[in-house]
Amino acid sequence: MSKKISIKQFLMRTGRFKKAYDALSSIKEGRITINNKAVTSVNYFFNPKKSIIRFGEERLRPAKKLYFILNKPAGYVCQKSQNEKSIYEFIAALNLPKEAKSSLFSIGRLDKDTEGLLIITNDGKLADSVMNPKNEITKKYYAVLENPLGVSKIRILEKGIKLKGGDEVYKTRPSKIKLVGEREAYISISEGKKRQIRLMFEAIDNKVNYLKRVSIGGIQLGRLETGEIKQVAKEEIMEKLNT
């Protein structure tokens, strides 16, 4: 049995809508039908393999699954933006049909000042798998710190440390830290709270001056240049993700 998804998720995977707002407006206006019945609830879930979905008279289908890796430069946000530089500028430059480009998104995000590996896709199932904390997919980062990092501080971080993110207080999962210089380290975590790496070091009175994600599972940034985006096969993604 195919997994049910929300009508919003389905519409965004077709590439027919540039923004989630446009898709939601079409739903609320009654322009989306499933098996010839108008759907006006944005929280409606259904089985796409057993349904015919139309936008007016146009039948909608999910776009072909695509997979890319991007070496995100610092200074770019991971969401669409009219005011800031965005990773969608790299997606827009791809030699793909308009609908295919519109269907793409990043799995997770890196903050504006962080560089490194992003997986770009339109495969929602893959995104759910990577983002699910239960799967414990390791993300590895290279950090340059403001102050030297001693063994005692490493042990504190590796065991897990309480952080405050917004209104939430949480304890990080155990991590692994490898020093490669007095102020340089690789940090491996299996979760991805907002600004987690930076907050971890702030909690021990240190500061991250430079941060780059170098791998997700077994998917490596390798020699991908800053700002370069590269298409990869689904098999390569799936094979390396859990290694």
Image: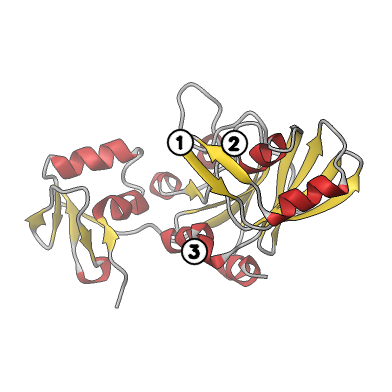
In the picture of the structure, the residue carrying the numbered disc 3 is 129
Residues under labels 3 and 1: Cα distance? Answer: 26 Å
Q: Amino acid at mark 2?
A: Asp
In the picture of the structure, the residue carrying the numbered disc 2 is 111
Quadrant placement of the C terminus:
bottom right
Viewer-nearest residue: 200 or 89? 200
Percent coordinates x, y for residue 216 in the rendering: 65, 57
Name the disc covering residue 80, or none. Answer: none
In which quarter of the view is residue 128 placed? bottom left
Percent coordinates x, y for residue 166 in the rendering: 49, 34
Q: In terms of sequence position, does the residue under pointer 2 or pointer 3 come before the other? A: 2
Q: In terms of sequence position, does the residue under pointer 1 or pointer 2 come before the other? A: 2
Left or right position of 110 against 15 = right
Q: Amino acid at mark 3?
A: Ser
Quadrant placement of the N terminus:
bottom left
Name the disc covering residue 167, or none. Answer: 1
Disc 3 or disc 1, which is closer to the eye? Answer: 1
Residue at 21% over, 71% down? 50
Q: Is residue 93 visible?
A: no
- Local crowd size for mark 1, using a 10 Å CA cut-off: few (<14), some (14–19), many (≥20): few
Residue at 38% over, 57% down? 63
Mark 3 near mark 1, Cβ–Cβ under 8 Å?
A: no
Percent coordinates x, y for residue 238 in the rendering: 58, 69
